[in-house]
Image (cartoon, rainbow, N blue to C red):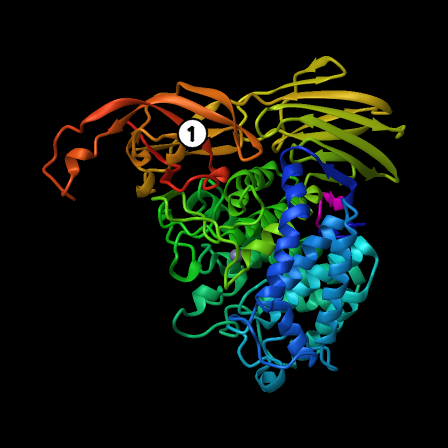
Amino acid sequence: MSKIINVSKSPYAKLKTVPVGSVRVNGFMGKYFETLVNVTLPTQYDLLESTGRLDNFRIASGKMKGSYRTLFPFDDTDVYKWSEAVSFALANREIPELERILDSVIEEVKAAQDEDGYLGTYLSGERKKERWTNLAWNHELYNAGHLIQAAVAHKRVTSKDTLFNAAKRFADHIYNTFGPGKKEGAPGHPEVEMALVELYRETGERKYLDLAKYFIYARGKGLASVPRNPGPEYFIDHKPFVELEEITGHAVRALYLCAGAADLYLETGDKKIWQALNRLWENFVTKKMYITGGAGSRHDWESFGEEYELSNKRSYAESCASIANFMWNFRMLLATGDGKFADVMEQVLYNGLLSGISLDGKHYFYFNPLEDFGRTRRQKWFDCACCPPNLARFIASFPGYMYTTSSDGVQVHLYEKSTAAVDFKGSTVKIEQETDYPWSGEIVLTIETDIEEPFSVHLRIPSWADDFTLRVDGKALDLEPQNGYVKLSRNWKGTHRVELLLPMKPELLEAHPFVRDDLGKVAVRRGPVVYCVEQVDNPDFHVWTLVVDSMDLREEKGEILDRKAVFLKGKGRALSISEWEGKLYRKISEPKEREVEFTLVPYHMWANRKPGAMAVWLLRKV
Ligand SMILES: [Zn+2]
C-alpha cells in the first residue's frame, strides 16, 4: 500500500490513488529512477553525513558532543526528505544497502526524540527553552511535517513502524500544544498541514485532521509571521486563507499551503477553502506561472511577483516550488478529475521541475532561470539544501502519480514506458505502456484483466494536443475528450490493445502582452517539452541575439550525456554585436544581422555541458 497520499476513504476525492509500488517506470522517468538509486540517493546520504546534518541528531541525543553543526533551523528536513525518497524507491526496487542505511538513520532520528515527544535538533540542549517561541522562523512545524511524511511513506512501504511511532509521538506533542484553549499558533512555513491530513488518513484519528484545519484557519492573525521585514504577506499570514484572492508571498510556502488546504478539502468538502483554492489557482496559472511551470519570479524573499511580473533572467522558480506546484495540482485533480490540473502537472514536470537536477543525478539548481549568461550552474549541495532531497523524493514517488481509479474505471494521467498492476473493484487491471514519451506521442497501452463487468479507461488528452487518433484492438474510434480525458467504456476482459497518437510538432508560443519580458519574443514547445537555445550547440553567434521568425523547425535525434532527446534545428538570424563595442546605448538604427542555423534543446536538459548563455524566450522579428 505504498500510496503517496491515501484518499481511499476521502469523501471529496473523485479519484483514488494507486501505490507507488504498483507501477514500474522504464522509459524517460525510468532513467531518472535508475540514476536516483545508483547516484542521487547514495551521494545525498554522504552529504547528509559530511555536512553534519546527521551529527545534529547525534548531538541532540547526546551520542556526540558539540552544538548544532549546520546553518538553518530546518536542516533536519533534508534527512527526512531523503528518508522519504529511499522509502518510495524501496517500493519499486530491492536496495538492501540503502535500506540498511535508512534503518540506521532512523535510529539516529529516534534517539534524538525527547521524553515529551518533541523532535527537532535545532532547539535541543541549551536551546530547549526556545521551543515554540518563534513560529515564524524556527520551522519546527515544517520539520514535523517532513518527518510525518517520511514516516508515513516508510511505514506504507516497509510495514515498519520505527519512524512512524516517533512521528506520531511528535504529532501528539504538537496536538497537545496547539489549538483552541491551548497555545495559539500557525506554521511560519506551511507543510505540516499536508502531513497531518495524511497522518489522519493513516491512523483514522480525527485529531490530526482537526489540527491541520486549525493551522489553516489560524492564518491571517499574525500568529505565523513577523510584522516587518519581510512582514505577514511573505508568510501568507496577511489574510485568512479563505479570503485570499491573489497568490503572493514566498512561493514554496504559498504552494505547500494550497496543497495542504486541498488535502483538507478532500476530507471535509469545505466550500470556502475550495473557492479560495480555485481563485488562487486561476490567478497563479493565468498571471504568475512561468511557461516552464516554475513559480516565484523574485529572488527577494523567494517570492511571487506582481501579476505578469515574470522576469526571465532573474526568475527564481525554485525547484521546491515546482514540486509544490505539482503536488497541489495532483490534489486538485483528485478532487475533480479535471485534466486542466494534470496539464499543469505535466507542464511543470518536463520543464521547470526536472531542470532542478542534472542528468548525472548529483548536481542541483535551487533557482531555475529561463535566461542566463552562462554563470548559473547546478551545484552539488547548498547550505540551504531543501531542493536536492525534495527532487529525490519526487522522482522516487513519481510512479504513484501516473494512474488513479474511480467508481467507473481507471484514469491514465501521465504517459511513460511502464508496467502497472492497478487494483480495481477487488481485481487487477494490468496496464503496459509502450512509448517513447515525451519525445514521441505514440502510446500503445496493453490492458489485461479478468474483470467480467464493463468499466472505463480514461486517457488524458493533453491541452497542447490539437488533435489525436485512437484505436482499440485495431478499430479507430472518434471520441470527444470531456474535461481533458477520453472515456473508453467496454468489457475489458482478456487482453486489449489501445493505440493513442498525440501528434507532436514544434510550436511557437507567445506570452500575454503584459509580460514585458516576453514581448516580441517566442518560446518553442514540442508536445509537453519547452525548448531553449544553449550556447554550446550554437558556437557561431551569441544565443541572446538569435531572431526566430519561422515555424520551420526540423526535428533531429540528439543526446546529452546518455539521455536521448529530440533536438530542434532551424534557420534564423543573429544580430551583430561587434558594432556595439564600447557602447551601451545609441541612436536607433537598422540592426545588422546575418542568417544562421540554430539548434534548440529541451530546457530541462540545459547546463549539463559546457557553460554558456541560454534563453527560453527567443527574439521574434525585430
Ligand atoms: Zn528548495
Give the residue type that dot 1 points to. Answer: Leu
Q: Residue furthest left?
A: 587
Q: Is residue 525 magenta?
A: no
Q: Position of residue 561 (x, y in %)?
A: 54, 35
Q: Which residue is mark 1?
A: 600
Q: Which residues are magenta?
A: 12-20
572 horizontally vs 325: left or right: left
Residue 40 in view here: yes
Question: In this orientation, which residue lies closer to the viewer: 512 or 293?
Answer: 293
Q: Position of residue 494 (x, y in %)?
A: 87, 23
Q: Residue furthest top?
A: 475
**Residue beneath the point at 50% across and 64% down:** 383
Badge 1, how many Cα within 10 Å: few under 14, some, many 20+? many
Kindly state the secondary structure of the residue where label 1 is placed: strand
Q: Position of residue 334 (x, y in %)?
A: 67, 45
Question: In this orientation, which residue lies closer to the viewer: 241 or 127?
Answer: 127
Tell me: residue 486, above or below residue 231.
above
Tell me: residue 73, above or below residue 101.
below
Which corner quadrant of the image does residue 211 belong to? bottom right
